Image: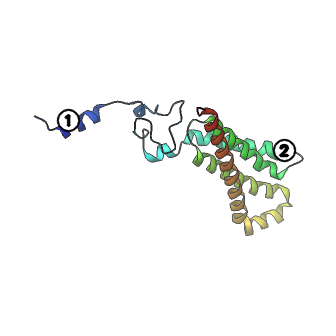
Amino acid sequence: MQRSDETESASASTSVSASDFGLDGFGTDSGDDGVSASGSTGGGSRFGRAFSPKSFAVVLCLSVAGLFVGGAIPVVGFVGRFLGLFVVGFAVGLVASRRRYLEVGLAGALASGLAFVLSTLTAAFAPFAVDFLAEYGVALAGMGAGAGLLASLAGHYFGRDLRAGLTRDI
């Protein structure tokens, strides 16, 4: 004869839910705290729910494209890069069903920091640029990464806010 707490633990371990297959938030917003409507957290480890390598790779490619497209606008030029990152973050926030702040922020920071360093190499006389980067390269990359992080996260926040406003019942 089994006690009642033993039957509960045995039945809980044999139940199968959609989160076991990674389908817990498919097409819907899982909420702000990562807990679904049934009270269970998403499948996988905590790191797996917080960071998705696939979405990071996609957002990184989009961020690099946004940097080039935004930087190619003749009137705004340098500021256009951050506008491009903002637009990419906004689009991801508007389209994605789950929060992707970590992926968007990391991709924006990485793309912007790298673009700052590479633009210094191509904008100045080569020996001067190499000397400048040897002295101030880390600070330059840090400033670029910080500005890219802020632009990307602000775009993602406003995209998520618009998505929430469009999908909420009146």
Q: Quadrant of the C terminus?
A: top right
Q: Toward the viewer: 12 or 71?
A: 12
At horizontal 73% and vertical 62% (from top left) the residue drawn is 140
* Residue 53 spot, x, y in % from top left: 55, 42
Q: Which residue is mark 1?
A: 7
* Residue 41 spot, x, y in % from top left: 42, 41
| Label 1: which secondary element | helix
Tell me if mark 1 has few (under 14), some (14-19) or many (20+) residues whose alpha carbon lies within 10 angstroms of its own: few
Q: Quadrant of the N terminus?
A: top left
At horizontal 65% and vertical 45% (from top left) the residue drawn is 156
For residue 62, which quarter of the picture? top right
Residue 125 visible in the current orientation? yes
Q: CA distance from mark 1 to mark 2?
A: 65 Å
Kindly identify which numbered label has been placed on residue 72.
2
Q: Residue furthest front?
A: 170
| Label 2: which secondary element | loop
Residue 92 visible in the current orientation? no
Up-down: is 166 above or below 145? above
Q: Residue furthest right?
A: 75
Contact check, label 1 and label 2, Cβ < 8 Å? no
Up-down: is 44 above or below 169? below
Of the numbered discs 1 and 2, the one sitting upstream in the chain is 1
* Residue 52 spot, x, y in % from top left: 54, 42
The amino acid pointed to by label 2 is: Ala
Kindly report which numbered mark, 1 or 2, lies closer to the viewer in this rendering. 1
* Residue 119 spot, x, y in % from top left: 79, 54
The amino acid pointed to by label 1 is: Thr
Tag count in the figure? 2
